[in-house]
Image (cartoon, rainbow, N blue to C red):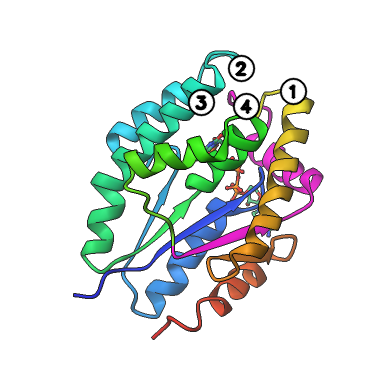
Amino acid sequence: MPRGRFLSLEGGEGAGKSTQARALAAALRERGVETVVTREPGGSAGAEAIRALLLEGEAGRWSARAETLLFAAARADHVEKVIGPALDAGRWVICDRYVDSTRAYQGVAGGIADADVLALHAFGSKGLFPERTFLLTVAPDIGAARAAERDRGATDRFASRDDAFHVAVAAAFATFDRLAEGEPERFRRIDAAQAPEAVTAAMLAELADWLP
Ligand code: T5A
């Protein structure tokens, strides 16, 4: 049984990651590829319990260090209980956010050193990285408008943070844009301002080398 492929979707708020995770999974299933869609934070029972700790409560509930540890703990459970077994069973896994989100939000935006995020990832999740990461790019104001329309006033701890945090997050993703240039085999930049069908088609084109 060949091991499945591990894909992740990253990008700013409202870029369309969840929409595209579902659409890409449907397109892969149509091609006969058994596909699991999952998300972070969360994705396993334990990680979903940690997600509630992370997304609920006031903005200053956790320090950046505590928050980084919680994300790493959630990911460790997710990898052990869901992602690893699915890949071992030959299924493809599409993960809506993964460790690059920690590198961007807690790392660049929260001031935690990338080396520390990666060291926690090496310990907690045995350093498992996706083979391909789609970086969905959209102007922050378009993403924010999409998310606001979807949420209609409801927010979580992350979405309710102040403008300075969101500017820092935009800077984080600009940094990863540059990082992606250094790792072109894994990262594929996708223009997420296009219509949803065009975004899905662009991701499929970037998987052409693996598709049956
Ligand atoms: N976080 C997460 C960290 O700080 N560190 C970490 O390590 C991790 C893993 C998670 C929060 O946690 C933080 C980052 C986040 O702040 P969440 O509730 O899981 O929060 O939500 P997000 O991942 O932030 O999801 P987003 O709000 O960014 O939304 P998506 O998934 O990018 O967008 P989606 O698909 O829900 O689409 C938004 C709206 O736009 C429409 C959709 O229909 C929807 O209404 N849309 C489009 N409209 C026009 N054209 C398109 N191409 C469209 N695509 C989607």
Residue 135 lies within the magenta run = yes
Q: Is residue 68 left or right of residue 122?
A: right
Q: Nearer the viewer, mark 3 or mark 4?
A: 3
Q: Which residue has dot 2 on it?
A: 59
Q: Which residue has dot 1 on it?
A: 162
The reply to whether discs 3 and 2 touch (Cβ–Cβ < 8 Å) is no
Of residues 76 and 183, which is closer to you in this image? 183
Please provide the residue range marked out in magenta.
131-157
The amino acid on which the numbered mark 1 sits, given as a three-letter code, is: Asp
Q: Is residue 122 left or right of residue 171?
A: left
Of residues 74 and 150, which is closer to you in this image? 74
Q: Secondary structure at mark 2?
A: loop
Residue 60, above or below 200: above
- Quarter holding residue 101: top right
Which residue is painted at 74% across and 23% down in the image? 162
Query: Disc 4 and disc 1: Cα gap in Å?
Result: 12 Å
